Amino acid sequence: MTTQAATVVHGDIDYVLTTTRTVRRRLDLDRPVPRPLVEECLTLALQAPSGANRQDWRFAVLDEPGPRRCIAEIYRRAFLAYYGEAAAPTLVGLDLGPGLAESARFLADNLARVPVIVVPYRLAPAPSQRSAQASFWASVLPATWSLMLAARSRGLASAYLARGLDHEQEVAEALGIPYPAATQAGLVAVAYPDCQEFRPARRRPLDEVLDWNCCG
């Protein structure tokens, strides 16, 4: 597969891996994202692993105001039902902390202005058995993450949002996605950021999350 080298803004893969994260307040809501650039990122995302090589993921892409506004309104209702209003947050909303809460609410209030919204989904119903969950999601989430990485390498930023799944059927009906025969995997907001420089996030030290040979 050949990609257009001119579109790559960040070619250092380690930099891309350590600076790709959910971006909310720093999205440029007024700068359009060209369709060819979105398609280039999705073409790369298709190379992600697919369980049994089924390739049964699909991507509904919204870049026009009407469809974006429709999905954004559904997402905002789901967000408010779960986290509450800023003046009257739910217990879950209080747990977010002020900084994260303000950032999350900003995007929920402005999602309709984000230039591109991508809804990834699988042409398969979600399993009810715990043992089947990893295999099921492993066939769509790697492609979603690859989309976000490809977007970052090309100077874009993204935010992966899952709260709208509380109204998955409503989103499906709005987008013409069969429900429950197909299963959505959240949505990805895509835009240019207000600047290109991002730093690695604070994370727990590796020794707090790593166990070697822990059996026995």
Image: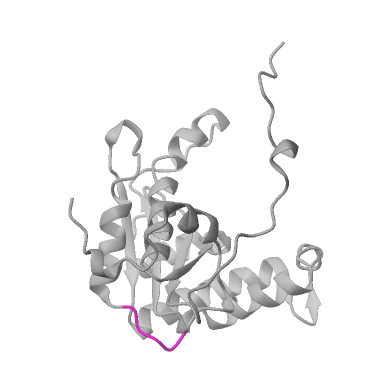
Residue extending furthest toward the front: 12
List x then y, in percent, for residue 95: 80, 63
- Residue nearest the observer in this picture, 150 or 87: 150
What residue is shown at x 47% (from left), y 67% (from top)? 158
User: Magenta segment: does it hold 147?
Assistant: no
Number of numbered discs visible in the structure rendering: 0
- Residue nearest the observer in this picture, 175 or 14: 14
Secondary structure mostly seen in magenta is loop
When asked about the image quadrant of residue 108, the answer is bottom right
List x then y, in percent, for residue 72: 49, 76
What residue is shown at x 69% (from left), y 66% (from top)? 82
Residue extent of the magenta highlight: 29-33
| In the rendered image, the vertical position of residue 72 relative to residue 53, given as above or below | below
List x then y, in percent, for residue 177: 34, 59
Residue extending furthest toward the left: 2
List x then y, in percent, for residue 74: 52, 73
Q: How is the image coloured?
A: one colour
Residue 176 can be seen, yes or no: no
Decide if residue 107 is on the left or right side of residue 120. Answer: right
What residue is shown at x 53% (from left), y 61% (from top)? 19
Residue extending furthest toward the bottom: 30
Residue 163 can be seen, yes or no: yes
Residue extending furthest toward the top: 216
What residue is shown at x 78% (from left), y 74% (from top)? 98
Decide if residue 163 is on the left or right side of residue 101. Answer: left
| In the rendered image, the vertical position of residue 203 relative to residue 209, given as above or below | below
**Which quadrant would the C terminus be assigned to in this image?**
top right
- Residue nearest the observer in this picture, 178 or 210: 210
When asked about the image quadrant of residue 175, the answer is bottom left
